[in-house]
Structures are given as C-alpha cells and as structure tokens.
Image: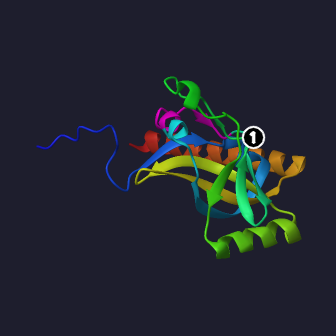
Amino acid sequence: MAINPSPEPDRGARVSIARNPRATHDYEILDQWEAGVVLTGTEVKSLRARKASIKGAFARIAKGEIWLEGMHVTPYEQGNRWNHIPDRSRKLLLHRREIQRLIGAVEQRGLAMVPLELYFTDGRAKVTLALGRGKKLHDKRSALKKRIADREVARSVASALRGKS
C-alpha cells in the first residue's frame, strides 16, 4: 500500500477553496466558464491554506482582458516583505473567443460576471465565472418561496415513506 506523502490530493481532483453563495441569490445564472487565475507565490500558499474569500467579488473588462476584483486573499504568515496585497486585481485567463463572448454579453445585454467558486484542479488555481442577470426583489422572494415549498414536499414524502416501512 503506497502512501502519498504530499498534502496535495490526487491529480484531477477538485479542491474547493471558497464559494460565493450570494451569487445564486442575487443573480440568475445564465452561463458558466472555468478561468485560470494569475497569482503570486504567497497568494498560492494562502489559497492552499484556504485563506480566501470571493464574497462580493466581481469580474470586469479592461483593455480586452478580464480582471477579478474584490477577491480577498489573506497575506501569508511567513511571507514577510514579499507578501502580496490582499485585495489587488487579479487577471483571469480565458481563451480569446470566450473573452469576446463575455465582452459582447456584458456590453450589449447588460449582464454581470460573478465568480461562483475558487478551487484547485491539477495544482492550478481556477475560478468558475458565471454570466448572470441581476434578480429583482420579487424574483428573490419567489425563489425563496419555491425552495421552501420544495423542502416541505420532500419532508412530507420522506415522512410518508417512513410510515410505510
């Protein structure tokens, strides 16, 4: 039996670092992309320790490139003077065709780009970037009512199944 001495998971495994639960509450998700993130060495070490937050983060377009704003990566404790700035803009890596499609959707249809999840896959930091349309207050309320109704149905079905056996 071989023991893997490194703390890294198996190749191809997806290790989640941070999620943005408000994104699905505030936006109707239309499409998703996987994008690489340009990071410095101390940022990678902080991410491996899961010291990051993407709550309130968003993506913007500048000079034909996509940048991630508002992502907070806590400074690495042993980083001393080479440490990174916690809230700096980080470049996202996408194919040119994907960038053009995102630019068209954001500029013409008025959609927003929001990160849903930050994770490692094959040792590389990736972010799931979603294209979303902002929900109105009544949309949020109806989604909440639907979720509560679905939960009640599932609860009643489970209790009915427990009563039979």
The residue segment tinted magenta is 45-54
Height in image: 121 above or below 63? above
Tell which residue pokes out farthest to the front in this image.
81
Which residue is at 46% across, 37% downward?
A: 48
Position of the N terminus by quadrant: top left
Which residue is at 86% across, 67% downward?
A: 107
The tally of labels here is 1
Which residue is at 59% across, 48% downward?
A: 117
**Who is closer to the viewer here, 139 or 129?**
129
Residue 67 appears in which quarter of the rendering? bottom right
Q: Is residue 94 left or right of residue 125?
A: right
Q: Is residue 36 left or right of residue 5?
A: right
Name the residue that disc number 1 marks: 56
Which residue is at 14% across, 44% downward?
A: 2
SS class, disc 1? loop
User: Was residue 52 drawn as part of the magenta stretch in this picture?
Assistant: yes
Height in image: 148 above or below 93? above
Neighbor class of circle 1 (other Cα within 10 Å; few <14, some 14-19, many 20+) is some
User: Was residue 59 drawn as part of the magenta stretch in this picture?
Assistant: no
Height in image: 56 above or below 107? above
Find residue 38 and report its horizontal and vertical position in percent: 58, 52
Tell which residue pokes out farthest to the left in this image.
1
Q: Is residue 45 left or right of residue 12?
A: right
Q: Is residue 99 left or right of residue 134?
A: left
Find residue 147 and report its horizontal and vertical position in percent: 69, 46
